[in-house]
Image (spheres, grey):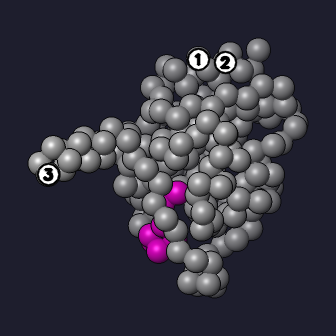
Amino acid sequence: MKNTLLFLFVMLLFSCKYKKELPKEIINESFVKKNTSEEDFQSKLKIINFEELNKILHQKNDTTYVVNFWATWCKPCVKELPYFEKIGEQFASEKVKVILVSIDNLDQIKRVETFIKKRNIKSNCYLINESDPEIWMKKVDSSWNGSVPATVLFNATNRKFFETSLTFEKLYSELQLLQK
């Protein structure tokens, strides 16, 4: 029994796993902003379903996208968020968009909003509203087993998926390689 508990504790430390979300009916629509158009990224946090996210994940334009899947309860995710913010700042004059997609439970929306405000996150932030992560995660990338952090870098011609924490240097170099 001790070995089982120790194994579970170690697994928790090294891999953050997706938590199940609340059904749509529980969301207070008047509280949540739901505008997900490309032109309106002014709000700090928006609710997005997979269909809307999928449109973003398959843009075919002259922009390079950096999409990071994270959660407030995931320590490796929180540790790497400043790297995405720094990428957003360093590539601000280029056609690069950083998008942060929280997979926190919908009942944690206030926590996520507070987290974003407290850390002054400037990137485009979404909270995904889907009941079955096993289905939509495989549609993001067929190799994704559900662990976070996970990141997709893509443009019209190239796409890379990472199911691991990224250092700033790795993120920067991968972004530069993708843009060549």
For label 2, the crowd category at 10 Å Cα-Cα, with few meaning under 14, some 14 to 19 and many 20 or more, is: few
Residue identified by numbered label 2: 176
Determine the residue positioned at 45% across, 33% down.
Answer: 165
**Quarter-of-image position of residue 98:** top right
What is the magenta segment's predominant secondary structure? helix
Amino acid type at circle 3 is Met
Residue identified by numbered label 1: 173
Amino acid type at circle 1 is Ser
At numbered mark 1, what does the secondary structure look like: helix, strand or loop? helix
Q: Distance between the residues labelled 2 and 1?
A: 5 Å
Residue in front for this viewpoint, 4 or 114: 4
The outermost residue toward the front is 1
For label 1, the crowd category at 10 Å Cα-Cα, with few meaning under 14, some 14 to 19 and many 20 or more, is: few
- From the viewer's perspective, tell me whether residue 34 is left or right of residue 38: left
Residue identified by numbered label 3: 1
Tell me which label, 3 or 1, sits earlier in the chain: 3
For label 3, the crowd category at 10 Å Cα-Cα, with few meaning under 14, some 14 to 19 and many 20 or more, is: few
Residue 156, horizontal then vertical, whole percent: 84, 31
Q: Are marks 3 and 2 in contact (CB under 8 Å)?
A: no
Amino acid type at circle 2 is Gln
At numbered mark 3, what does the secondary structure look like: helix, strand or loop? loop
Tell me which label, 3 or 2, sits earlier in the chain: 3
Q: In this view, does 104 lie above or below 33?
A: above
Quadrant in the picture for the C terminus: top right
Determine the residue positioned at 76% across, 51% down.
Answer: 54
Residue 36 visible here: yes
Q: Does the magenta stretch include residue 16?
A: no
Q: What stretch is highlighted in magenta?
A: 103-110
Q: Are marks 2 and 1 in contact (CB under 8 Å)?
A: yes
